[in-house]
Image (cartoon, grey):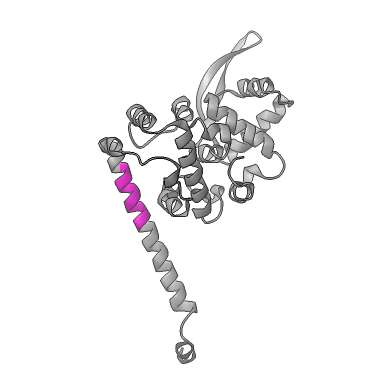
Amino acid sequence: MYIEKGLVESKIAIFRGRGSENNMLTLKTLALKGSLIKYDLFKALKELGKETHYPTISRRVDNLLGRGYLEIVGKRTITVGKRKEESSKYGLSWKGFIASLTIEPVAENLLRVLEVNPHLKLPFPRKPTLRIIREIFTDRELKIIGKALLTGYLKAIPKDLESLKPEQYVMYLLPAMTEAPQIREKFEEKDLSGLLQIPEVLNFVSKLLDDTEKMLEETLLDIREFKRRYLKPEEERIKT
């Protein structure tokens, strides 16, 4: 875990307590290899030298699926004895992707993770956008940016990752930037104009700004209402 352990455990429940190691290994493996059926995931963990049992991994996958960190992304035909049957393929959900970025090998291979997990739908064309990002940034720079943004993101979300609804994931990107550690001095300034020439990317950034502005306005209204109700000047409280 290359981000502050206390911050990660406070905001990502599956990374604390019993089962946290298997949760981390499961997300890491699916992030780097792409979607897998349970048995292939079990074999991949065995190859890593992880001493575990198939029923344990099966239960872990079911638990992560139920909590929204994984999703079923397809089926694969397998042969059991002489019988063929369909087995579900499990992949990271966006919640699982965010959680997996706290694991260093995943953060070091961010673009590869997005490439081998095409079921993670992006709001803009995948191939040209990833190609331009790869041309602009090195893997090291992406890791630095990812660490800073993810640290800011975990600080910005009000409770923990499981409390967020899917439609709220993107809303905390801009607040995350205000919480993120300064990274400008880590590498030379980059020209991002190529990305903004892709209409879908420009629309995504514009919508992100609009959604964040709306969220901040609603928060400000809530703060004003709280102050009006509970923090009135003493003379006003006496009158009412």
- Depth check: give the residue in front, 187 or 73: 187
Left-right relation of 59 to 112: right
In this view, 102 is above or below 223: above
Q: Residue at x 36, y 42 (%)?
A: 189
Residue 223 in percent (x, y) is at 44, 69
Residue 9 in percent (x, y) is at 63, 47
Left-right relation of 196 to 186: left
| Count of numbered circles on the image | 0
Residue 63 picture quarter: top right
Is residue 71 visible in the rendered image? The answer is: no
- Depth check: give the residue in front, 93 or 110: 110
Residue 219 in percent (x, y) is at 42, 63
Quadrant into which the N terminus falls: top right
In this view, 164 is above or below 31: below
Left-right relation of 138 to 64: left
Is residue 150 visible in the rendered image? The answer is: yes
Q: Residue at x 49, y 78 (%)?
A: 230
In magenta segment, residue 212: yes
In magenta segment, residue 112: no
Secondary structure that dominates the magenta span: helix
Residue 13 in percent (x, y) is at 62, 46
Q: What segment carries the magenta color?
A: 204-213
